[in-house]
Amino acid sequence: MAYLLTAGLLLGAASAAVGMTIDHQSRVDHHSGPVAAQYRGTIAVSHQQVGAVAPAGKMSTLRCRWAANMVVDRHAVAASGATMTRQIEREAVLKGTRPGWCSTHRAAIAQEVADRAADMKGHLIDLAQEDHEALRNELDRIHGAQRAG
């Protein structure tokens, strides 16, 4: 029986539930003209059941590890009308652990992630700032290709 329980815990180790989305808009200055960039971060919470249920009178090690991961879609439009898209992933922007079964904590974990939406927005803004250099490089390649053509 304990073997079946352990096997069941291993099989259910990595379930994910899609949560909220967060948006951010920014403007990137480039010598070819201003670029409007929109960033949409989608939060997915993964749960991992770890530990084991102990027999009566012994301490259980059962707990739920969780992590909120962010997948960001960037959609930018240059002054020339060129569109540049990119997907960026950021793992474990929030994470935690709770004692017991993951199934009993999913709603509380989702609420904790929602309550920390300001933190998630901050991660999205930081990621957008980091992406601006990559966006400028893409614009340089496009601008160079247009001059050569």
Image: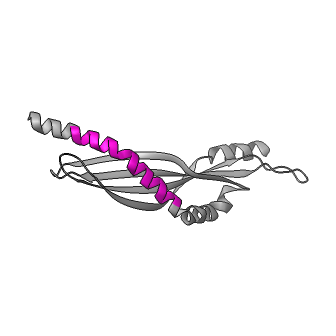
**Relative image position of residue 74 (x, y in whole percent):** 33, 51
Q: Does the stretch in magenta take in 64? A: no
Q: Does the stretch in magenta take in 129? A: yes
Residues in magenta? Answer: 119-140
**Magenta stretch: dominant SS?**
helix
Residue at 62%, 46% (x, y): give it. Answer: 13
**Front position in the image: 96 or 103:** 96
Residue projecting furthest to the left: 149
**Relative image position of residue 136 (x, y in whole percent):** 28, 43
Quadrant housing the C terminus? top left
Residue at 42%, 49% (x, y): give it. Answer: 127
What's the image's color scheme?
Answer: one colour
Q: Is residue 89 left or right of residue 98?
A: left
Residue at 73%, 44% (x, y): give it. Answer: 6
**Relative image position of residue 143 (x, y in whole percent):** 17, 40
Q: How many dots with numbers?
A: 0
Q: Is residue 132 left or right of residue 102?
A: left
Residue projecting furthest to the right: 57
Residue at 15%, 50% (x, y): give it. Answer: 80
Q: Is residue 146 left or right of residue 1?
A: left
Q: Is residue 32 left or right of residue 109?
A: left
